[in-house]
Structure formats: C-alpha cells, structure tokens
Amino acid sequence: MLILASKSPRRIEILKSIYKKDFLIVPSNIDERKITSNNLEDLSYLIAYQKGLDISNSYPTDYVLSADTTVIYNSKIFNKPKDEIEALNMLTNLNNQIHEVVTSYVIFLNSNKVISNKVKSLLTISFKDNQAIEDYIKTKSPFDKAGGYGIQDKGYFTYKIIQGSFDNIKGLPSNELKESLKYLKLI
C-alpha cells in the first residue's frame, strides 16, 4: 500500500492523477518550525524526510511518500503566513519578483529512504495592485500555502513560469514522481 504523509488537497489531487490505485492519507504531525538548515534549498528535503520517517515508523511494511514545498526569495524562506499582516508582507515582497519554489519528496519503505528528489522552479506572480493582494488574502487561501499563494488560484494574480512545472509549484512534481513510482514498480 502507498501512504501519502500529507493532507494537502493539492498533493492528493496530483498523486491521484498519476497513481490510479487506492492510497492512504496519513499526515505527519511533526513540528516543521523546529527543522532548520543553513542551505535554504535543502530545507524542503529535510522537512519531507522527517515527515516521511515519522509515518514510516508506524507503517514499516508500506511505501510512504512525503513532500514539502518551500518558497525562497532574496535569501529568505517564505513559509505559510501566520496572519493577514504576514500574508500581505509576503505577497507584496513576491509581487513581480522572480522567486524560487523548491519541492522535495521522499519515498520510504521499512523506515528507510528508498528514493528522494528535490525539484526547483522559478517564476513570478503579478497582482494588479495592493487591493488585489488584499482581496486574495480575504479568501483565506494564502494561509495553508508556502509563500502565501497557490498557483492554481485563478483570477487573483497572473504568473509566469520561467523554469520548472506548474505541478511542482503546486506542491508535487508529477513528472519526476511518476518516474520514481515506475522505478519502484508501483505504477
């Protein structure tokens, strides 16, 4: 059985699009804020690893897929905003700026890492004005997303992907994950 160590609706949707069998959803409850790294691009991997290990310890005979996404701009990590002020600051900083989205995933079996991958994308998001940012924040959508935005949230901003893929920015790099699942003979 494959277990997704995430309750993210976006990751569930992406996994369903490439993995046509049933899978369990068992989110990890690790405290992501306690995980740090001097290398910002490695942070998503370290968090994904800890999430997967946490669940794999409870399900040692199943494959466990964990993932994490970070947004990096100006040598800073933009996590999920805690409140409206932080969301406004994040989105104002990211608006019209090239930034990086890094999604890492790890697949475990028997509490051991089997496969891992870190995929980077570069993009810009563009809000028409400050009112558009404030309107987007009122939807509450920013609060469960790294960087305070979901690329799939149509109508509030435009985006331009410079490098990488829509699915990676959304939360799970589907092409790379599909290859990993094929390698493990899970699809």
Image (tube, rainbow, N blue to C red):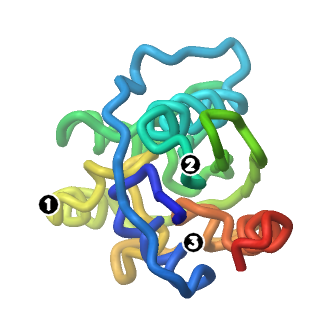
Label located before the other in sequence (3 or 2) = 2
Q: CA distance from mark 2 to mark 1?
A: 43 Å
Q: CA distance from mark 3 to mark 1?
A: 20 Å
In the image: residue 53, left or right of residue 123: left
Residues packed near mark 2 inside 10 Å, few (<14), some (14 to 19) or many (20 plus): some
Please name the residue shown 78% across and 72% down the image: 185
What is the tally of numbered marks visible in this picture?
A: 3
Label ID, residue 61: 2
Residue 48, horizontal then vertical, whole percent: 57, 38
Residue 44, horizontal then vertical, whole percent: 61, 36
Q: Look at discs 3 and 2 and give the one toward the viewer.
A: 2
**The one of 6 and 127 positioned closer to us in this rendering:** 6
Which quadrant would the C terminus be assigned to in this image?
bottom right
Please name the residue shown 61% across and 71% down the image: 167
Relative vertical location of residue 46 with respect to residue 164 in this rendering, above or below = above
Q: Residue furthest front?
A: 61
Q: Which residue is mark 3?
A: 159
**The one of 157 and 148 positioned closer to us in this rendering:** 148
Q: Amino acid at mark 3?
A: Tyr
Label located before the other in sequence (2 or 1) = 2
In the image: residue 34, left or right of residue 106: left
Camera sees residue 163: no
Camera sees residue 66: yes
Q: Which residue is mark 1?
A: 138
Q: Look at discs 2 and 1 and give the one toward the viewer.
A: 2
* Secondary-structure class at tag 2: loop
Relative vertical location of residue 9 with respect to residue 72 in this rendering, above or below = below
